[in-house]
Image (cartoon, grey):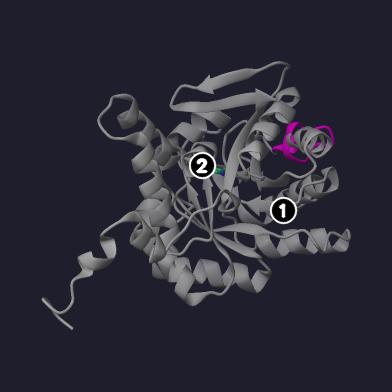
């Protein structure tokens, strides 16, 4: 059928038609809100490169969770900034560690909140790398044990799901085994399966104090040029027992989200990362773009590409927008 028999504008005439044929929806239930937890009491400090995002202390979590729940956002992912760092990141699996305390506080104050934890060492190591160093290199196999211990300590503290973001080889299998051996068969793993070595993480590293003190993460995070390798990474994580596959960042990697959606039947998540958030905020604050509409259009593009779940600093803003 061609013009003039077919006129696509017929179904764009008014909002009733448009909403009737709308292909993609976003609900607050699809969104995961990242939280940065810092030591101290009564702390609520804005991250300078992420306007609207706050680093908060454990005692502020009840209030934060209630605000999220009131908006329909019932998913958070926790990042901890510890009091002290050391070479082997022992704060990551400490019993009274910052994330472990945060999980307990959340489960106490807002039991309906689904609590996922980021499992990585970069916030806990003095050198800022995501694993244990042998010389100047991040050693894969000795890091696995520490990651598994960390994931297990999160489960013991009451986490609902763990999300390894370190990009070591074999970590999903190691974490699955540690959880299963300790009767946490029912705790899913959302794997950062396809995580690129990206400049879009800049603002996060300010918020989490996790920039590497030397070198970069190219020897463990993926080369942005590679798409076929993404399929191999995802296949490995599926075989090792991942329950959800994540792509990170999101907008510069919509092709990867779409390929994962086509080739795998597990739920796909995408992390709309700190730099992606910061760019929209910065232009919005200057009045150069309509921030709300760009936010909604961006998150929609990630869903349209095939992501079921979006981790985003816009979760609360988007939930508010959807109410209007
Ligand atoms: C930890 C981790 C990072 C992010 C999530 N988990 C930083 C990094 O890999 O350097 C980035 C998230 C963001 O930029 O919003 N490894």
Residue highlighted by disc 1: 161
Query: Which dot marks residue 302?
Result: none
| 285 left or right of 117 in image | left
Q: Quadrant of the N terminus?
A: bottom left
State which quadrant residue 281 falls in.
top left
Looking at the image, residue 299 sits to the left or right of residue 120; the answer is left
Residue at the top extreme of this rendering: 42
From where the camera sits, is residue 213 visible?
Answer: no
* Residue 10 in view: yes
Work out which residue is located at the far bottom of the displayed protein and give it. 1
Q: Which residues are magenta?
A: 89-98
Above or below, 161 against 7 in this view is above
Q: Position of residue 19 (x, y in %)?
A: 39, 59
Residue 40 located within the stretch drawn in magenta:
no
Q: Which circle marks residue 323 in the picture?
A: 2
Q: Position of residue 110 (x, y in %)?
A: 77, 37
Q: Is mark 1 within 8 Å of ligand 1?
A: no
- Residue at image x 70%, y 39%? 88
Instruction: Give the secondary structure at mark 2.
Output: helix
């Amino acid at each position: 059928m061609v013009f003039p028999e077919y006129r696509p504008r017929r179904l764009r005439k008014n909002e009733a038609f448009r909403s009737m044929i709308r292909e993609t929806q976003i609900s607050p239930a699809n969104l995961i809100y990242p939280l940065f937890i810092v030591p101290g009491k009564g702390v609520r400090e804005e991250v300078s490169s992420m306007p609207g995002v706050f680093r908060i202390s454990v005692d502020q979590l009840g209030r934060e969770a209630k605000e999220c729940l009131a908006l329909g956002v019932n998913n958070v992912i926790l990042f901890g900034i510890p009091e002290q760092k050391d070479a082997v990141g022992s704060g990551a699996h400490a019993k009274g560690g910052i994330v472990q305390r945060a999980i307990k506080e959340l489960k106490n104050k807002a039991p309906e909140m689904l609590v996922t934890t980021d499992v990585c060492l970069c916030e806990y190591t003095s050198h800022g790398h995501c694993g244990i160093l042998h010389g100047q290199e991040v050693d894969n196999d000795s890091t696995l044990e520490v990651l598994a211990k960390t994931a297990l300590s999160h489960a013991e503290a009451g986490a609902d799901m763990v999300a390894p973001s370190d990009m070591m080889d074999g970590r999903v299998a190691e974490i699955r085994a540690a959880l299963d051996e300790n009767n946490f068969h029912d705790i899913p793993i959302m794997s950062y399966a396809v995580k690129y070595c990206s400049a879009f993480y800049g603002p996060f590293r300010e918020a989490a104090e996790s920039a590497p003190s030397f070198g970069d993460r190219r020897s463990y995070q993926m080369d942005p040029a590679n798409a076929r390798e993404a399929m191999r990474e995802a296949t490995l994580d599926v075989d090792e027992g991942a329950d959800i596959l994540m792509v990170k960042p999101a907008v510069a990697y919509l092709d990867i989200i779409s390929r994962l959606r086509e080739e795998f039947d597990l739920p796909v998540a995408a992390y709309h990362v700190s730099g992606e958030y910061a760019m929209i905020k910065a232009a919005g604050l200057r009045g150069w773009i309509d921030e709300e509409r760009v936010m909604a259009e961006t998150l929609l593009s990630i869903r349209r590409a095939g992501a079921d779940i979006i981790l985003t600093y816009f979760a609360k803003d988007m939930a508010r927008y959807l109410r209007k």
